[in-house]
Amino acid sequence: MKRYWQLPTLTLILATTLLNSGCATITRGSEQDLKVESEPVGASVTLSNGMKGTTPANFKVSRKNALTVMVAKPGYKTATVQVTPEVSENGTAGMIGNAVFGGVIGIGVDATSGALNDLKPNPVKVTLEKSK
């Protein structure tokens, strides 16, 4: 009787492993670290999602949404950089893995969560110009 259950259990474990191996939401997550650097350092950073920090700064942000990064320091012109989500090579591999192993639901989850994307540019590097 014990052997009767071994094959279905093994099949279930193998199927779960294969289906999840292509799921970018599981392997990559829906958030990404965004690094902001400036010259000179010590500039204030404001993201369009409301997060704030001082350079060099790291933010954990959604892979799904575009962001505007504003970098400012007294005596310098404010710099603005657009950060956009782009489908990454790893995200493409995850989508192919979902398609190959029948994970149509996984493709939808990955697409809506942003897990297929990488934010670019990352790191954001800004050289501030002195004000006149």
Image (cartoon, grey):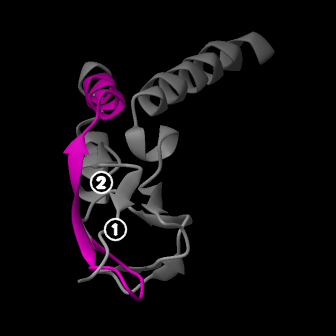
Percent from the top left, x then y, of residue 107? 25, 41
In the image, taking residue 104 as reference, residue 115 lies left or right, namely: right
Percent from the top left, x then y, of residue 75? 38, 86
Tell me which residue sits at (28%, 35%) in the image: 88
Q: Tell me the distance, in whole angstroms, between the alpha carbons under discs 2 and 1.
A: 31 Å
Q: Earlier in the sequence, mark 2 or mark 1?
A: 2
Q: Is residue 53 visible?
A: yes
In the image, taking residue 2 as reference, residue 47 lies left or right, namely: left
Q: Nearer the viewer, residue 51 or 80?
A: 80
Residue designated by label 1: 128
Q: Nearer the viewer, residue 60 or 80?
A: 80
The type of residue carrying mark 2 is Gly
Q: Is residue 125 above or below residue 51?
A: above
Tell me which residue sits at (34%, 30%) in the image: 94
Return the mark for residue 114: 2
- Quarter of the image with the N terminus in it: top right
The type of residue carrying mark 1 is Leu
Is residue 56 found inside the magenta-colored segment of the image?
no
What span is in magenta?
A: 69-98
Tell me which residue sits at (30%, 51%) in the image: 109
